[in-house]
Amino acid sequence: MRLQIGTKFTCHSDFMDWAKLNPGRTLEEAILMWHGLENRKKNPDSKRVIAKNNMLAQYVRDFLEDKPKKSLKDALYHWKSNERQQNRVLSRMKPMI
């Protein structure tokens, strides 16, 4: 793909999701889709769908939307603190047998 698109090609998650859902598509179709996804990123109103299993990305997006003056570093700090608190709670729970 890099030969056809150039050095700006990156295999981001939106493109990988499309490729997984569309087996058997041609290289030409994949290139057209990649360009379409790249153009969509330029639209400020466009938000990509975050997969349910990517809770960190969703947390960061929500955190920065709620607190626009905060940084990515702040969001990651709060994510890690919340994770540590949850682990402490879980470690105190008695196992259910």
Image (cartoon, rainbow, N blue to C red):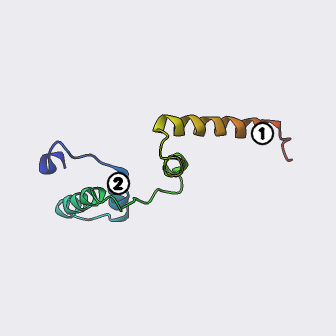
Image quadrant where residue 84 sits: top right
Residue 16, label in figure: 2
Residue shown at 48% from the left, 47% from the top: 68
Residue 61 in the image: x percent, y percent? 48, 50
Q: Nearer the viewer, residue 82 or 33?
A: 82
Residue shown at 38% from the left, 58% from the top: 17
Q: Nearer the viewer, residue 73 or 51?
A: 73
Element under label 1? helix
Element under label 2? helix
Three-letter amino acid code of the residue under disc 2 = Met
Residue 36 in the image: x percent, y percent? 24, 62
Three-letter amino acid code of the residue under disc 1 = Val
Residue shown at 53% from the left, 40% from the top: 75
Residue 91 in the image: x percent, y percent? 78, 36
Residue 57 versus residue 14 in the image, above or below: above
Which residue in the protein does label 1 denote?
89
